Structures are given as structure tokens and as C-alpha cells.
Image (cartoon, coloured by chain):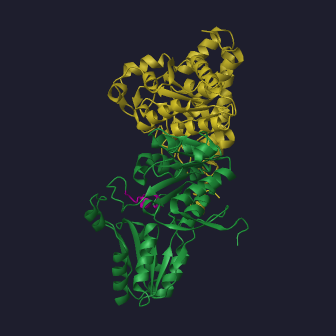
Chain colours: A yellow, B green
Amino acid sequence: MTRLPDDLNVDLHYWMRLTRTMDDQLVTLWKQGRGVGTTFNQRGHEAISVGAGMALEPDDVVAPMHRDLGCYLVRGMTPRRLMANQLARATGVSRGRDANLHGCGDLSLNVIGFISHLPQSMPVALGAAMSFSYRSEPRVALTFAGDGSSCAGVFHESLNLAAVQRAPFVVIVENNQYAYSTPLRQQMAIDSLAVRATAHGVESRTVDGNDVEEVFRSVDAAVDKAREGGGPTLIEARTMRMLGHAIHDGAEYVPQELLEEWTARDPLILHEEKLTSRGLVDHEYLVRVNEKCREIVDDAVEFAESSDWPDPATVSDGVYAA
Amino acid sequence: MDSNRTGSRTMTYIEAIRDGLRTEMRRDPDVLVMGEDIGGEFGGAFKATKGLEAEFGARRVMNMPMTELAFIGAATGMGLMGLRPVIEVQFADFISTGFDSIVQYAATTHYRWRAAVPWVVRAPSDGGIRSGPFHSQNPEAWFVHTPGLKVVAPATPSDAKGLLLAAIRDNNPVIYFESKPLYRSLRGAVPQGNRATPIGRARIAREGHHVTVITYGEMVRQALLAADGLAPEVAVEVIDLRTLKPLDRDTIMASVRKTGRAVVAHAANRLAGVGAEIAADLGQTAFEYLDAPIHRVGGLDVPVPFSPPLEDAYRPGADDIVAAIRETVAY
């Protein structure tokens, strides 16, 4: 396969590292009792969320979900706003209205927020894509689902409608082997999630979700196709959820061998090895990026923890649009 | 008189809905209609959209596959991008198949991240037309109970148009309950032009001073029949709510403070229905003015039955309102 441009590969690494640093910090905060409610672990998903997010143009619309921290960051949602949302502060994206990455929508960044009823963002992102067709705008909408939510009715309704409408729409199914505690074999009787698209007349492919170059390349191709009027694409990106469903979950139900197998294929480390072996970066560079990300995340935590809580007098504000 | 008003025309309730859709589609290129079987010559199960595709094209009159979760969710995405979709769910009964897209996604979005979702779901509701358990329901209470939605229920051709215009122009998700039994049986004057009926304001459909009947939808007609039957012995005031969420509590309270007696009526089943909220509210805001207990008239707590004798036993009508008024007045 052809290599991506060097500067793009270096950028992809930066966003994956920032995602990892922020995710590790979230785990730390919660273990220290500084979190509010719960938080969802990102480890293992960095190449998918960053690779897909980077393949979009600024005018394109994306509807990420709870394991797509990297995508929010790539789209320009700042670590400060995201951290403040995790910590339920007035300065968070949802101003304390919604938890962790939920409610992190911002139309000025062309980001649509998700709800817990996955994959309920799918028809919403599809509607954005249909509005682009309606207005003959060369824009694309992309969203994410999981192996678990690919079993839900709205997943199939949305694929069916996307195919009929030939909408400029891309859906990434992040197959991370588990829906909460339920392994794939108890969720579905098929080996490949991509066949779900075939059933609806949607083109699909399966990619290595831990190879950010492969993710980017396949999403980029699907986005180009959609923009040129070629209709929707489903991309199954295979990975492993390396930690529990959410911070409270020790995931003791996951076999140790499976985790070891995937630890050896950590998407961030794989990409760092690739960059190093190609002579694009050296160890010192990686250390510097690490430190930079550390500073950004520390600043975000300080910002969030020193931010005001939402004023209880505002509890009813914003239920309705003016 | 509104400057947009250029006279009025007599039409049926469903013609008024079609007139409302056409008016807004001509006025605003962002308005489109979507739903099952609504396109082409067919024009929908009740013909509400007949002729629209011929005028506006298939781009703006979008036939949908049987995927309510997907197409109501898609309407939310279109709304986020600035379009104003008007969704027809073929029967209000089928609205449950799109429930998550309405009450979980669309209704919560503005509160959570301040993005407006300007769509309308048109829900052909109500029974009395021998259509059985799944083509007769009045599920408005589900949506009145949901923060973030607005709910309207026109009782006249004039409001069928006026509330539809207001719902389409509103920047929030609005559930528009249209009454099937009124579609072709009720005719009335409908203002031409762009005049909307404001959401959140009730109408005094008939003035009286002995008792207030608070109702909406087809039951307004039943209440007016009841009032006719009791006049002049009992002077009944009838409030047509027009909007169920937000409720016009001031108009309701003022009327009941004046009459001292209240009957709350709807075709939906009475248990935990919209009438329960109104009665409870009046128990607080008009307590000192009440001369009798508040009566509620509503459907039974059973699925809507098919056979005419059973449906008639289920569904309240003018006779039930008369009985409730008599009991209230005699207290």
C-alpha cells in the first residue's frame, strides 16, 4: 500500500498521542476520586477516531461517539472544553448539561453530539448528509457505531435509508470485540460486520483499526466517493477495547491472552515505530511531543478544576430554542 | 387585522393542512415534507400531501421507506443543518416506532448543546372511525411529558393551518396532532396568506359563565355540541387549548375563576392524561374559586377497541360531557 505523506503521518501521531495522554489523565483523575459520574476509556480506539477525523474537510460534518475523543480533538474541540465537560463544569461543552463526551456537539466545528442510545447519531448524521444533497453542497457526513450498536434496529434502518437516498454518508463501525461485557459471538452470528452493509446495498470494507494509515486511507477514499456522488460507505475498523466499558468496569470478563495479543499491536506504538523506522522522527521528538501533550492536558485539568460549577439558577435554561 | 391576511376561504380541516404545507413550502425553500407514501400522485394515506410533489418536486416531497427511527432521526440532522422538515407519520399510533429519535435525541439536543432542531411531526390521531387498536390512538401525553418538545392539537380548519405555520416556523421539535375524524367532516373559514396561530395560546371557543369545559382536538366539537344542548339553562364556556405544551395556564385559570366550575375532557384515556395535569393545576390555582369538584372526561384505560359498540363504550363524546357538566353544576 502507498504511504501517506510524511507530514500527515506526523500529524496523525500528534493527535493520537494527545488523545492517549488525555485519556490516561482521565483514568488518573477518576482513580483519584476527582472525576464526576463516569468516563469512557479510549485506549485502543485512537487510530480510528483520529484517522477518520483527519480524513474530513472542515465543512464536513461528523457525529462521534463515546470512544472518539481523538475525533473531537482533531475537529478543534479544545482539551479545556472537553475536560471541563468531563468534570461537569459551566465551561464544558454542554455547560454541565451532559456527561463525559456526551453532549459534546458544536455546529461551529461541524460536530454533532451523541446520546447514549447508540447508534442514534447514525440517522442524525445521515440527515445532515441528506441536507447536503438537498442543497447540492459538496459536503459529507460521517459517524461512528460499534459492534454492539450494529445490532440495533436504527443501524439497519439508517443504512437502508442511506442506500435508497444515495447519501454522502460514511459510517465507521468500531468493532472492539465487546459490547460492555458481551463478546462478539454472543452478539451476532456473522464473522464480518461489513456484510451488514452488503445486505442494504451499501459498499463496505474491513480495515485494521490499529493502523492509522490504513484507517485514514480507507476513510479518505470513502469520503471522496461520497463527495463525488457515489453514495454511502460502511467501514468496519477492527480493534480491541483495552480497558473496561467505563472507568468503573475492570473488564475481568475479557481473557488475558486477548489483551496481550492486542497490546502487542497498540495503535500509537505501532505508528511511532513506523515513523521512527522511516526516519521521520527520532526518540527525542517523541519525548518532546509527549511533554507538549502533557502540558496541554495539565492545563486542561487546571482550567476545568478551577472553573465554576454551573449555577443551579440556570437549571431550566436552554430547554427550548428561542 | 393582520396585514398578510387577504381574505378567507372555506375549506375542510385536511384541506387546511395541505394549504398550510403549501403556504410554507412556497414561502421558505428550506421547508420540505417527508414520510411514507406521501409522494407522487398518491399524496399520502389521507391525501394531505396530494399535489405537493407536482408543484415542488421529489426533492422537497420525500417518500420514505418504513424506517421511522431513521427518517425522524434524519429530520433532526436536516434541522441541525438549517432545513425545516415536516414529517408525516402515517398514523399517530406509529409514532412509537420513532420514539428514541423524538424523545431521546431531538427533544434533548438544545438543552445539551444548544443546537436548534426545527422540525414538525404531523401525527394523524384519534378514533371514532372504526379503525381498531393501531389506527385510533391519542398518544399526546407521552410527548407532553417530554421536556424539549412542543405539542399542538388544532380543533378547527383555521387552526389546522395556523398552528401548522407556527409549528414549522418554530425552532424546536413540535408534535402536531391532527384529528382524523375532523379531516373531511369539519369545514370552516381559513385565512389566506401567512398568518400563524401562536403556539401556547388557548382560545375561548364559546363564552359562558356557569361552567368551563377545557378540551382540544375533536373533543372541542363534542363540547360545543354539549353546550348547545344545555343552553340556555346552563351557559357553558368552552376553552379550545390549541397547544398542549406549553399549556396556556393563564387562560384556563381565568376562565375557571370566573365560572367556578371545570370539566376537563379529552379523547385520550383519562389515566395520567393531559387533563390530569390541568385538573391538578386548577386544584391549586383556582381552589378558592371552585364551587364543585373538577370533573374529568376521557377514554377508558383499555386499548382502543375495533367493534363499534366497544369503541363507543371506550370513547367519550358529547353525552359524556353533558353528564359531567350536569353533575358539576348540580353539586
Magenta stretch bounds:
B136-144
Query: In the rendered image, which quarter contains the N terminus of chain B?
Result: bottom right
- The outermost residue toward the right is B3
Horizontal relation, residue B104 to residue B230: left or right: right
Residue B297 placement (x, y as % from top left):
36, 73
In the rendered image, the vertical position of residue B254 relative to residue A251, given as above or below: below
Query: In the rendered image, which quarter contains the C terminus of chain B?
Result: bottom left
Residue B112 placement (x, y as % from top left):
57, 50
Nearest to the observer: residue A280 or residue A4: A4
Instruction: Examine the rendering and report whether any part of residue A234 can be seen.
Output: yes
Quadrant in the rendering for residue A128: top right
Nearest to the observer: residue B12 or residue A217: B12
Quadrant in the rendering for residue B157: bottom right
Horizontal relation, residue B25 to residue B92: left or right: right
Horizontal relation, residue B281 to residue A108: left or right: left
Nearest to the observer: residue A176 or residue A256: A176
x 61%, y 12%: residue = A274
In magenta segment, residue B314: no
Instruction: Examine the rendering and report whether any part of residue A312 can be seen.
Output: no
